Image (spheres, helix red, strand yellow):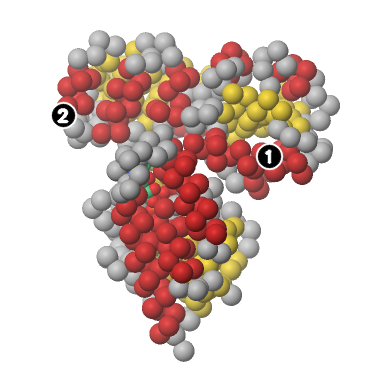
């Protein structure tokens, strides 16, 4: 049995592990993909205190080394269920199950899908969720970006430097993202705004060939594109844990600043929790709070 | 064995004409998830002598990437007897890579 099992080895989970290990608790981190979380996708972090510039990869690597050196154990298995057995909790993974006195859920968030038929099959064959990752494949090609927030605007600007034509498709006629970015886009000749419209169909043969866009009057237009970049936000993935941790409507764990869920001994930390600012520094902060709360909880047992 | 770097000049010989299944890792230096993937590939190359593990840098080998329909990385493709047998886009843990290679 472990003292604390942490689900998710992103910035929140690994910070929690650091605090728990420094309090001499045994720690198992369960991670579905690889340590680091979402931040590994970014080439440059400029707002984390102390380091003026660091790549997401280096950030993840350093955090991992620090966590590992303190003696936290990592297993690369996706957690699918938490069973509350009172003073012990069992975490079931795709491979095995593990018990602990306390559990910290630090599962972060995932790219939101468009929800159009065929999307999953076309990931890597025309559909992407990361312009800075995959933009290079679309040099001088025709691409579309879907979304109206800052990520979508920044993606469209980034792609405008590479691609021949960039369609920016948004379901409203105003963008949620910064006006400065929207203005820069309007000035780009190769950017075409497709407003009040949603993507309703993906046409593909082996790879994406074209998309159908429906506007608010119900008119359908077919756009030939080589690539479609989906930038419609992120979503938490906590449904498997809903029986032990109350979720809000959007699926975020309803835990306050003290990171406690409705179940004693189960805590939530990071982007998966209801909060205003989802950043590295707030994820790390949650990790510290959740681990400290978990240590207190363990001391209160027996 | 170590991971072998493959170019368009060696692709046919190393990948298509290989008598063992080949796990191809399409990657780039600037791609964080690709760099996270790499230790798993190094481990598999060292542990498994029934397969060959190769790496293709998509910036240097853009023709290979285009010819093989790569448009998102990291992308792992398994070739058996010169044909694509399986493909995965995105960062995955070692167990998933082992499943992808299959029997
Ligand atoms: C492109 C990009 C750029 C960004 N740039 C910045 C920036 O410059 N500055 C900044 O402060 N923030 C930035 N952010 C936001 C920052 O990355 C997040 O706020 C932070 O990573 C949240 O940390 P987390 O640990 O809560 O979640 P995540 O980083 O999402 O980590 C969660 C981890 O849990 C794992 N997981 C999920 N479900 C399970 C499960 N069931 N079982 C096991 N493991 C599971 C996931 O695989 C993942 O590794 C950026 C985000 C993106 C996407």
Q: Quadrant of residue B35?
A: top right
The residue that disc 1 covers is: B42
Q: Residue at x 44, y 80 (%)?
A: A298
Q: Residue furthest bottom?
A: A302
Q: Is residue A193 left or right of residue A155?
A: left
> Which image quarter holds the N terminus of chain A?
bottom right
Q: Is residue A41 visible?
A: yes
Q: Quadrant of residue A12?
A: bottom left
Q: Residue at x 44, y 45 (%)?
A: A59
**Image side of residue A87 versus residue A162, left or right:** right
B19 up-or-down from A163: above or below: below
- State the residue at coordinates (38%, 78%): A296
Report the residue marked by disc 2: A179
Instruction: Give coordinates of residue A171: x percent, y percent.
Output: 24, 30
Observer-nearest of A103 and A96: A103
Q: Nearer the viewer, residue A97 or A259?
A: A259
Asked if one can make out residue A244 in the rendered structure from this viewpoint, the answer is no
Q: Quadrant of residue B44?
A: top right
Q: Is residue B24 left or right of residue A267?
A: right
Dot 2 lies on which element? Answer: helix
Q: Secondary structure at mark 1?
A: helix
Distance of mark 2 from mark 1, alpha carbons?
46 Å
Q: Nearer the viewer, mark 2 or mark 1?
A: 1
| Chain to which mark 1 belongs | B
Both labels 2 and 1 in a single chain? no
Q: Are the two marked residues, 2 and 1, in contact with CB atoms closer than 8 angstroms?
A: no
Vertical arrangement, residue A286 with respect to residue A292, above or below = above
Q: Position of residue B70 (x, y in %)?
A: 56, 23
How many numbered marks appear? 2
């Amino acid at each position: 049995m472990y003292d604390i099992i942490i689900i998710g080895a992103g910035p929140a989970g690994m910070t929690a592990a650091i605090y728990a290990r420094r309090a001499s608790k045994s720690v198992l981190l369960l991670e579905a993909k690889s340590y680091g979380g979402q931040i590994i996708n970014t080439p440059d972090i400029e707002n984390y205190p102390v380091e003026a510039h660091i790549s997401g990869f280096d950030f993840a690597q350093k955090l991992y080394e620090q966590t590992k050196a303190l003696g936290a154990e990592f297993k690369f298995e996706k957690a699918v269920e938490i069973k509350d057995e009172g003073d012990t909790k069992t975490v079931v993974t795709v491979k095995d199950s593990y018990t602990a006195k306390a559990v910290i859920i630090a599962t972060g968030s995932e790219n939101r899908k468009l929800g159009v038929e065929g999307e999953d099959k076309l990931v890597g064959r025309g559909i992407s969720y990361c312009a800075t990752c995959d933009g290079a494949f679309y040099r001088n090609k025709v691409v579309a970006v879907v979304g109206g927030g800052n990520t979508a605007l920044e993606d469209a600007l980034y792609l405008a430097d590479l691609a021949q034509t960039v369609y920016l498709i948004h379901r409203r006629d105003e963008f949620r993202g910064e006006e400065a970015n929207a203005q820069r886009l309007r000035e780009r000749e190769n950017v075409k705004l497709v407003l009040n419209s949603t993507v309703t169909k993906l046409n593909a043969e082996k790879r994406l060939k074209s998309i159908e866009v429906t506007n608010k009057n119900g008119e359908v237009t077919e756009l030939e594109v080589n690539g479609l970049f989906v930038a419609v936000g992120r979503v938490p993935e906590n449904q498997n844990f809903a029986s032990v941790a109350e979720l809000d409507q959007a699926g975020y764990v309803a835990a306050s600043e003290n990171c406690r869920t409705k179940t004693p001994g189960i805590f939530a930390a990071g982007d998966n929790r209801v909060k205003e600012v989802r950043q590295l520094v707030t994820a790390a902060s949650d990790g510290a709070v959740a681990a400290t709360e978990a240590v207190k909880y363990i001391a209160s047992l027996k | 064995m170590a991971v072998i770097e493959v170019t368009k000049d060696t692709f046919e010989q190393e990948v298509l004409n290989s008598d063992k299944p080949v796990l191809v890792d399409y990657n780039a230096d600037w791609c964080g998830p690709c760099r996270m993937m790499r230790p798993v590939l190094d481990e598999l190359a060292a542990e498994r002598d029934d397969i060959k593990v190769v790496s293709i840098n998509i910036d240097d080998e853009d023709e290979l990437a285009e010819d093989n329909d790569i448009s998102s990385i990291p992308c792992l493709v398994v070739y058996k007897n010169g044909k694509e047998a399986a493909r995965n886009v995105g960062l995955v843990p070692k167990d998933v890579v082992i499943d992808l290679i299959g029997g």
